[in-house]
Amino acid sequence: MISTGPAPAGLQHGSTIVGRVHALMLREQRTRFAGSIFGYGWAYFTPIAWIVTIALFFDFLGRTSPLLVPTPIFVATGILPYVLFRQTLTSMMRAPKANRFMVYFRPTSLSETLLASGLLELMNMLIVAFTLLTTISLMYGVAPPDSLFKVVIALLVTWCFAFGFGRFFGICGRLSPTFERVLPILIRPLFWVSGIFYIASELPGPAQSLFWFSPLFHTIEYLREGFFLGFSSPISAIGYPMSLGLGFLLGSIALENYWLRSRPDRGVL
Amino acid sequence: MIVFSNVSRFHRNERKVAVVLRDISLVVPPGGRVGIFGSYGAGKSTLARLASKVEYPDEGTITQVGHVSWPIGFSGFLQKEMTGADNIRTVAGLMGCNSRKLFAYVTAFTGLGTILDFRVGTYAAFERDRLAVALALAFPADTYVMDGLPGLGGTEFQSRCLGELDKRLRHASLLLLSRNRRHLESLCDTFFALNDGVLLAAASADHAEALSMPVIGERTA
């Protein structure tokens, strides 16, 4: 930004989108768990605790893995994409309100606050995924992933879907707070229909056809295909969640333009 | 430079629509110092946000030429859970400037010193206002938008701010919205009154004050 006015030495400014998104990510890191005893450690501890609890519960029920692998690693490969989806979504739903005054620093925009929030969650969850999968693999002597590439792609596609979905509903939340309340109810069934505790081939035909529409089922099974040698699933069309995420992303751009014009929330983000 | 052309702004809830600004046309020319007097609830802050393009009009258009500041005097962007120093770093990142130089400028200007190492939530109101004003004044602009001038903990610091602003205005223009006639007199050369969302031209700051009247609790449906 070039200005004719005098400025204190060195304070001529000219921000880039990368700089602004980075500043927003740091801001979120500094504030989200401010004042709590472990600080930002909660960002890693919470999903790890969630995953470990579910794995223990699965074990407690006496269920065994349908694949010839230890139960904890089977559950972890199912729950990780789901937690990535939920954490990204929750974070992006919260971001517009938490950063509502950041648009004062133009050209910082709503889009950038959402992007920063989504990227931070991706970063957190990649660290969580690496820590958890490595720890369980070492504890139970599981072989490293058959295809690390497929594992990473599965996580990235999950994030892309969550980002598009989160962006769409994050902006919907600005249009009406009803969306913020309805969304958790809408997405709750995903926990049960996404193959976290089972694999697609265990399902009867009609259920398999119905659950095929769950985008997370595809990413979870794709991740397992990458992790476990020889495993192949009839529900692992990775293009489906990707397309769905892209559709939500495009929809969110149209919605954002509408919101910028109407501003039912008195304009202050 | 800022140009408002037939700008209107409404606030809505489920049942009612309130007119906040009605058909405002206004030019803040290069080098101009435009002062608008308005009582509580007259629409000053909304007009300031529109001028800075933080908010958008329901009708009409607003054109900015050059860089326009965010409304000076607003401190809502300071995150209470972060220290003053971390807030400075965030602003530096968003504005793309060197955070150490910004920190040095704010420290020297505000005199807040080690207070900046504490959470903003623990600050007295004037300390928070000082930090916010210093951050706004740190960045050069072609047009400064000012939504009143907070108390800032005494007339000495307030005078320092006005002096700093006056220096900047040798090369920039100003849109000042205030309910303090003396501030308008000392900084502006063109005057308006904002009365129930309607902008009225005035000959002087006194005249602008006379044209304005309290509107608390009133909203035109």
Image (tube, rainbow, N blue to C red):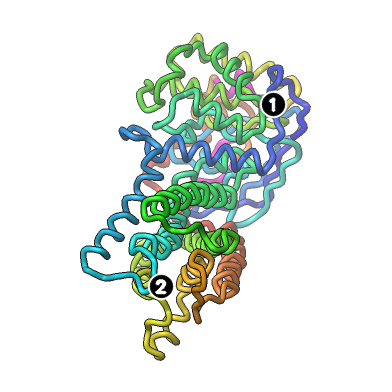
- Residue B95: percent from left, percent from top: 64, 33
Query: Alpha-carbon neighbours of circle 1 within 10 Å: few (<14), some, or many (≥20)?
Result: many
| Secondary structure state at the residue bearing disc 2 | loop
Mark 2 belongs to which subunit?
A
Q: Is residue B28 left or right of residue A225?
A: right
Which stretch did the figure color magenta?
B183-199
**Chain under disc 1:** B
- Residue A260, picture quadrant: bottom right
Identify residue type, mark 1. Answer: Pro
In the image, what residue type sits under mark 2? Ser
Residue ID for mark 1: B140
Quick check: A226 above or below B79?
below
**2 and 1 marks in contact (CB < 8 Å):** no
Q: Which residue is mark 2?
A: A194
- The question of residue A70 being in magenta is answered with no
> From the viewer's perspective, is the residue at label 2 or at label 1 nearer?
2
